[in-house]
């Protein structure tokens, strides 16, 4: 196959690779807000729990959008015929989440936080909120739609010195947590349902996987600057859109960690590049959307006596076996699309998700005949279906309706190969590749919510929120830079809670910016790491330590001792500790006296000559660390050992 | 040709002035410059109940937002894009082996579309539309539909009740194997009660159905209710007027309630309809109808049915409350009411200050009947002296008739006769299960949440 090229791996890609692919990427970042109650009812926001008081069973049917269209995702979910079970915990769920009570007034606390974030994003704020219903037929919301509203549009953020534009900032209710999805049953837990979150959507202006991750970080720290967003597992989730030249926008949903983003983006761009290669190959074989041809037929009886395990078992269970011939497709199902993945995975995924055939293998095909049917069986089947060498034969099995659905989906996905890249949302997999999740929903799934009236956002309210806006991460960064902090540290400080402590150290205690930076970005993290402490200590304590350091003119080593002592609980009052330990600064003369005493006490006879200095330094620094620079001690010790 | 009001649908005052000023109308693609920045999208109609100072814009991402007119500094039109909201219409297939079911529409949201004027949903209805949205119906029957009314259920009244009863009679005589009536849920039980009196000895099932979540929602109960109702009309052996609505809130099965014993008991739950003081007739699922009792009217092959459409409108329900003043009763007397249903406390009581007014009412020939606001249980006016005193005033206990049922029955009765003895005979003779001889112990089951054994039950069965 001349048009299909080897895969470029993540490790080998450069910005030029992405420029050649014409990669463009955008983000949708979901961030839960720290409110006490949910968005449209008065249920408390509680930690997730495994407790279940009751179950509800529902099904979803597609409905028309406001502009009179059925949405593609909606139809797909209807095809799956899923029983959807909602597990209820009495404490976190009322009749609203069950869709048995209309919504209550939008939570004003949530709106307040969302407006603050919209202003931080420099958005145009709407005059009037209109609640919309965004359809989700996967069942993740019992109503079948998410109540959502636009607070602002057309904003921007600064990422590595470049403006990245924001399409919108939405305020919406969170969906259920999926617990299980097997066969025709999907189970959701409802505690997360209804928690307020904001969705920040960027334009597809990001050009490398690394830049996508950087933008995600900026948005994360921007929302955190309000101090009113949830943190922890699942509190922020990223959707990443990727497209390449000649392709179309594909959405990778629910990326839990920002550091997973670069590899995922790369592999999706790679997949699209590969799919376009397949399209080109098919075109050169004369196969286009119009000329695409396939045949499907039931072959249950022909395979009655097969010894291939999975098929044997299926036949014993009374399942049906269907065959699909894809004309002219020979070899295509084996073309690599992502690392360790070939094109057949695209079809396998569709069959798994839409036909609900989730026991693997759910199909076999003649491009990789391998260890399944005997070659005589392949030959016989091919002959009976008029499948020639240039064709591909796919076999799938399941209950009658599922097997039928599977053959339809095999044909749909194969035909889409002639178009290139299907409109899909894909799920992030832990190895950095991705799998099919659903058909990409469009604007056709939006519907105005008739249960709630529009709600005005007044000029006065906007002004009030504007006055209390915190600094944006890039403003802080610039600000710290102007204070004399180096670029890397300024970026680091601007993106964490330490920034506030840094400012207070410099402004309230008079610590030099460089020293405060070194303490907060080098010494403190090192001590925390050594002691296994994850949470940043109380700002007051850190300020007390720096106060003692400044007042007693101590050095970083002393600051480190005080910090370690405080984290372990041995030191509660740094000022007292300075006197008691002691940590007061000594001069060379006093140091010389103390070092001489240490050398006199030490039993140096058993230590080889060349190791004596190091040995003595160990003893010396244990006593004098924090009182005098180690470099000075080393000189003095060397002199006293007669090595100077 | 578009009228001015279509061009600016729903806009009034400053909003309308702004649209006219920039020479744009609804469905125009526009770019709006405002003090809050630029907004691009399609101008949508404005709900008439919303304020006058916002323009509604559908952004390209599908969301709607409002732009305050005082922030607008400029507007440019770029084209037009009108919505064509249409439920996909497919010809309902005809299968000669399947029974003919007639669906009469009175309103409600069995199938619906968005109404831009009010921002609410309005019903859509033809067999083609129904087949387009609930194709399962074709597996059950050959469906014919007729829209009788398009009203919300609170606007159903005597005129509509009589018209519906007559339409039922006509369709039975025309050979329908069953009748389904699409109805808003709020007063569904009033309608099933009156139809139980106006349509007697029906040879076929008459099934009234609606939805608690409108059919424009993916999780709507409309489709499943309609499937259950149609199956009941086509296949069930129960030739009575029934309500067919969700049993549990889960998508599992519907309940068939006798039309005179059913009541809407929750403002929004799917499983809102309950049989009061008795058990339902049957459960119905996609697969089967499970009978819960044997004492029902069987389906017949003849086409005989009695249609008795009379109604005296001057009847009222008085819901008694402590310290009620006699002027409430007096005003009904002075306004020439012919009948009063009292929903009394406990076993059927009102306070003493009402006595003279009640005496005056019965003396004037007004029919006064007592029901209980507890809903469950019988009126029993012998237990306390109060009750005997009230009966001596000429107030007649109406056994275990539900207040709303007694109301429609009295209106129906007074439409036929004004003779008090005759009225009393009709009122107290059960016609369609509105009065029962006995209340089974499981006719009153309101289990209390929180009790361990109840919670255990709830955890075991889907709600």
Image (cartoon, coloured by chain):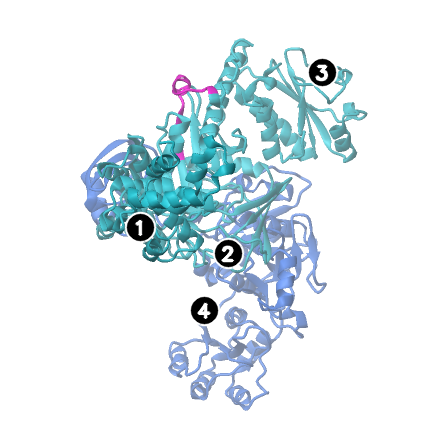
Output the chain of dot 2: A
Q: Is residue A582 left or right of residue A439?
A: left
Residue A252's tag is none
Q: Are marks 2 and 3 on the same chain?
A: yes
Label 4: which residue? B313
Number of numbered markers: 4
How far is the residue under mark 4 from the one under mark 3? 78 Å
Q: Are marks 2 and 1 on the same chain?
A: yes
Q: Give the color of chain A as drawn.
A: cyan
Magenta residues (range): A12-27
Residue A584's tag is 1
How far is the residue under mark 1 from the one under mark 4? 100 Å
Name the front one of labels 2 and 1: 1
SS label for mark 4: loop
Label 2: which residue? A100
Residue A382's tag is 3
Q: Is residue B400 left or right of residue A612?
A: right
Name the front one of labels 4 and 3: 3
Q: Are marks 2 and 4 on the same chain?
A: no
Residue A339 lies in quadrant? top right
> Does residue B61 appear in this view?
no
Q: Give the color of chain B as drawn.
A: blue
SS label for mark 3: helix
């Amino acid at each position: 196959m001349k048009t299909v090229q080897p895969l470029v791996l993540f490790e080998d890609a450069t910005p030029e690779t992405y420029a050649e692919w014409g990669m463009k990427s955008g983000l949708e970042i979901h961030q839960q807000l720290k409110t006490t109650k949910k968005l449209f009812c008065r249920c408390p926001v509680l930690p997730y729990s495994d407790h279940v008081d009751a179950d509800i069973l529902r099904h979803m049917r597609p409905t028309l959008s406001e502009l009179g269209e059925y949405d593609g995702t909606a139809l797909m979910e209807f095809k799956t015929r899923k029983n959807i079970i909602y597990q209820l915990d009495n404490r976190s769920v009322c009749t609203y989440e069950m869709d048995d009570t209309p919504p209550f007034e939008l939570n004003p606390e949530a709106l307040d936080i969302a407006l603050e974030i919209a202003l931080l994003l420099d958005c145009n704020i709407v005059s009037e909120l209109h609640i919309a219903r965004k359809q989700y037929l996967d069942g993740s919301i019992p109503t079948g739609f998410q109540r959502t509203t636009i607070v602002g549009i057309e904003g921007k953020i600064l990422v590595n010195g470049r403006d990245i534009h924001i399409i919108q900032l939405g305020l919406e209710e969170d969906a259920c947590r999926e617990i299980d999805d097997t066969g025709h049953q999907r189970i959701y837990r409802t505690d997360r349902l209804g928690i307020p979150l904001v969705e920040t959507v960027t334009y597809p202006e990001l050009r490398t996987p690394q830049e996508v991750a950087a933008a995600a970080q900026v948005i994360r720290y921007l929302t955190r600057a309000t101090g009113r967003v949830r943190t922890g597992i699942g509190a922020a989730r990223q959707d990443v859109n990727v497209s390449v030249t000649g392709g179309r926008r594909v959405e990778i949903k629910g990326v839990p960690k920002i550091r997973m983003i670069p590899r995922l983006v790369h592999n999706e761009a790679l997949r699209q590049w590969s799919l376009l290669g397949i399209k080109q190959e098919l075109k050169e074989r004369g196969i286009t959307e119009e000329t695409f041809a396939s045949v499907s037929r039931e072959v249950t009886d022909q395979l009655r006596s097969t010894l291939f395990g999975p098929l044997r078992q299926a036949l014993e269970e009374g399942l049906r076996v269907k065959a699909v011939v894809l004309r002219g497709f020979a070899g295509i199902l084996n073309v690599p699309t992502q690392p360790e993945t070939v094109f057949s995975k695209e079809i396998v995924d569709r069959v798994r998700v839409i036909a609900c055939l989730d026991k693997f293998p759910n199909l076999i095909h003649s491009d990789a005949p391998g260890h399944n049917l005997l070659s005589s069986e392949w030959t016989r089947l091919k002959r009976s279906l008029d499948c020639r060498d240039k064709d591909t034969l796919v076999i799938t099995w399941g209950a009658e309706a599922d097997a039928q659905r599977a053959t339809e989906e095999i044909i749909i996905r194969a035909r889409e190969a002639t178009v290139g890249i299907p409109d899909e949302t894909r799920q992030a997999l832990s190895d950095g590749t991705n799998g099919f999740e659903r058909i990409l929903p469009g604007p056709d799934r939006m519907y105005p919510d008739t249960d709630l009236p529009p709600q005005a956002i007044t000029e006065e309210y906007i002004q009030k929120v504007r006055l209390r806006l915190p600094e944006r991460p890039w403003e802080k960064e610039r600000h710290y830079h102007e204070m004399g902090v180096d670029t890397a540290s300024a970026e680091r400080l601007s993106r964490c809670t330490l920034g506030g402590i840094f400012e207070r150290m410099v402004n309230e205690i008079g610590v030099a910016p460089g020293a405060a930076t070194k303490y907060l970005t080098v010494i403190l993290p090192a001590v925390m790491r050594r002691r296994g402490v994850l949470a940043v200590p109380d700002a007051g304590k850190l300020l007390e330590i720096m106060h003692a350091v400044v007042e007693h003119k101590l050095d970083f080593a002393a600051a480190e001792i005080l910090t370690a002592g405080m984290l372990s609980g041995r030191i509660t009052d740094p000022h007292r500790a300075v006197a008691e330990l002691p940590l007061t600064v000594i001069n060379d003369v006093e140091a010389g006296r103390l070092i001489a005493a240490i050398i006199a006490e030490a039993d140096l006879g058993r230590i080889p000559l060349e190791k004596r200095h190091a040995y003595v330094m160990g003893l010396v620094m244990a006593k004098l660390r924090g009182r005098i620079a180690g470099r000075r001690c080393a000189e003095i010790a060397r002199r006293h050992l007669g090595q100077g | 040709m578009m009228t001015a009001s279509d061009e600016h649908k729903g806009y009034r005052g400053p909003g309308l002035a702004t649209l006219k000023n920039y020479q744009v109308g609804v469905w125009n693609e526009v770019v709006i410059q405002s003090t809050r920045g630029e907004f691009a999208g399609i101008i949508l109609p404005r709900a008439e109940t919303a304020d006058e100072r916002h323009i509604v814009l559908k952004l390209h991402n599908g969301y709607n937002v409002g732009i305050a007119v005082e922030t607008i500094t400029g507007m440019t039109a770029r084209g037009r894009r009108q919505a064509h909201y249409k439920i996909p219409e497919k010809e309902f297939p005809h299968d000669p082996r399947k029974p003919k079911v007639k669906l009469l529409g009175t309103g409600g949201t069995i199938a619906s579309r968005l109404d831009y004027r009010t921002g609410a949903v309005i019903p859509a209805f033809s067999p083609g539309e129904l087949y387009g949205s609930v194709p399962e119906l074709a597996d059950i029957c050959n469906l014919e539909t007729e829209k009788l009314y398009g009203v919300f259920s609170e606007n159903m009244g005597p005129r509509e009740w009589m018209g519906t009863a007559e339409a039922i009679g006509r369709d039975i005589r025309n050979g329908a194997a069953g009748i389904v009536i699409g109805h808003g849920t709020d007063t569904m039980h009033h309608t099933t009660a009156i139809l139980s009196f106006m349509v007697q000895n029906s040879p076929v099932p008459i099934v009234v159905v609606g939805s608690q979540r409108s059919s424009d929602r993916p999780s709507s109960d409309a489709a499943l209710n309609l499937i259950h109702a149609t199956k009941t009309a086509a296949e069930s052996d129960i030739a009575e007027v029934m309500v067919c609505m969700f049993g549990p809130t889960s998508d599992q099965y519907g309940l068939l309630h006798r039309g005179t014993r059913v009541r809407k008991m929750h403002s929004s739950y799917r499983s809102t309809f309950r049989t009061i003081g008795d058990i339902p007739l049957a459960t119905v699922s996609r697969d089967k109808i499970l009978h819960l009792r044997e004492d029902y009217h069987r389906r017949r092959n003849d086409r005989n049915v009695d249609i008795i459409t009379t109604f005296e409108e001057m009847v009222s329900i008085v819901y008694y409350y402590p310290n009620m003043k006699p002027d409430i009763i007096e005003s009904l007397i002075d306004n020439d009411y012919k009948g009063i249903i009292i929903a009394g406390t406990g076993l059927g009581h009102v306070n003493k200050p009402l006595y003279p007014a009640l005496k005056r009412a019965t003396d004037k020939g007004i029919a006064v009947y007592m029901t209980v606001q507890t809903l469950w249980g019988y009126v029993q006016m012998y237990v306390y002296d109060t009750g005997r005193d009230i009966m001596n005033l000429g107030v007649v206990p109406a056994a275990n008739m539900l207040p709303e049922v007694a109301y429609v029955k009295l209106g129906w009765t007074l439409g036929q006769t004004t003779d008090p003895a005759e009225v009393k005979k009709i009122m107290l003779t059960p016609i369609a299960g509105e009065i029962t001889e006995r209340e089974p112990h499981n006719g009153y089951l309101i289990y209390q949440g929180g009790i361990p054994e109840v919670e255990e039950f709830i955890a075991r069965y889907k709600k």
